Image (cartoon, helix red, strand yellow):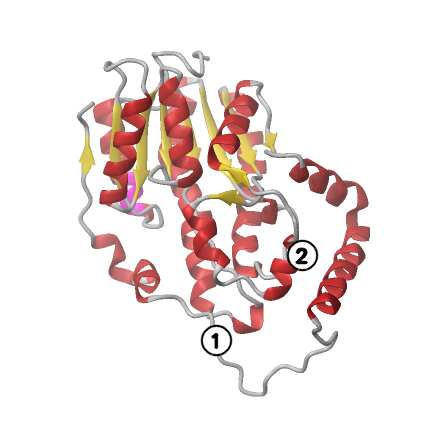
Amino acid sequence: MKNLFGQDTTALITGGSSGIGLALGRLLASRGANVWLLARDEKKLQNAREQVISCRRSPKQEILTLSLDLSCDDEVQARLDAFMHRHGVPDLLINCAGVAHPGEFLDMDPGIFRWMMEVNYFGTVNACRAVAPKMARRGEGRIVNVSSVAGFMGVYGYSAYGASKYAVRGFSDVLRAEMKSHGVQVSIVFPPDTDTPQLAYESQYKPAITRALAGEAQTLSADVVAEHILHGVERGQYVIIPGPEGPWLWRATNLLGSLFYPVMDWMINRARRRLGLPQHVPAQQDQTYPHQISEQQVHQLHPDRCQQQHVDHSKN
């Protein structure tokens, strides 16, 4: 296996235009790696590329971008195949692309559930389908799938997001077992709340109880999370949980098992009392969906979304 941070190492980062993905791109570039950033928004990608270029050690390092919708499986396969045919197979694939839209289940538009699965779960699967076989044939590689604390613990208000991140965990568990014999190391990351544009977006939709449960929970910077991820990958860890609180929650949910659910119920009831909310709330007879997805988000789910034109930039 090549040195993770060496000059001959190439990292492909999905969701690389912002947040944790961009922080990883900057960090890897500062340690000498070639970095390929993949995301949907061309303008954000170019801004991200400039940031990563400013961090690289040498002008010989390749900092490339690829504008692509990861939820479109056929397009991902074809365009990543062409990209890798031109530039080679990456040594490190980090799947950071993801979206979140919280809200109580009874208030959630069904399209939000499909959107979460298309981007968070199938986006991860599609990227792995394109890259993993080539890593396996080469006999080495690293794959890092970013889930969430909500991917191992049911978080109030995150039924759609949590389900998609649990799916990433299940997929990664099997992928780890199957890829090991091919010399490919798989890791899964469960970051807590991280100070990113995504967190700012979802904060406006969080139910009051979700906010109360979060309380004084620490929010990590994207740079700190990126450091934790690379440190864990370098050590060969499968489960990587950045921050001080996530590991404790991981141990609690695994050690307590079903006993953890009454604890969560107690915490939710305490939050309701603090907010002055009743313990039992009858549902509306004619349920509507105040938490609907925007036109831009609907477009991601529309059947013709995969026909958009995308551009890759192959200059250093």
Magenta span covers which residues? 74-78
Whole-percent x and y of residue 285?
Answer: 58, 87
Q: Please state which of residues 19 and 287 is positioned toward the viewer in this rendering.
A: 19
First in sequence: mark 1 or mark 2? 2
Find residue 85 and report its horizontal and vertical position in percent. 23, 26
Residue placed under numbered mark 1 in the picture: 289
In the shown orientation, is residue 136 left or right of residue 34? right
Q: Secondary structure at mark 1?
A: loop
Q: Which residue is mark 2?
A: 213
Label 2 sits on what residue type?
Leu
Real-space Cα distance between discs 1 and 2? 23 Å
Q: Residue at x 25, y 28 (%)?
A: 64
The image shows residue 281, relative to residue 104, as above or below, that is below
Q: Nearer the viewer, mark 1 or mark 2?
A: 2
Residue 251 visible: yes
Q: Splitting the image into 4 quarters, where does residue 131 fall?
A: top left
Residue 181 part of the magenta-drawn span: no
Mark 1, Cα crowd under 10 Å, few <14 / some 14-19 / many 20+, is few
Q: Residues within 10 Å of mark 2 (few under 14, many from 20)?
A: some
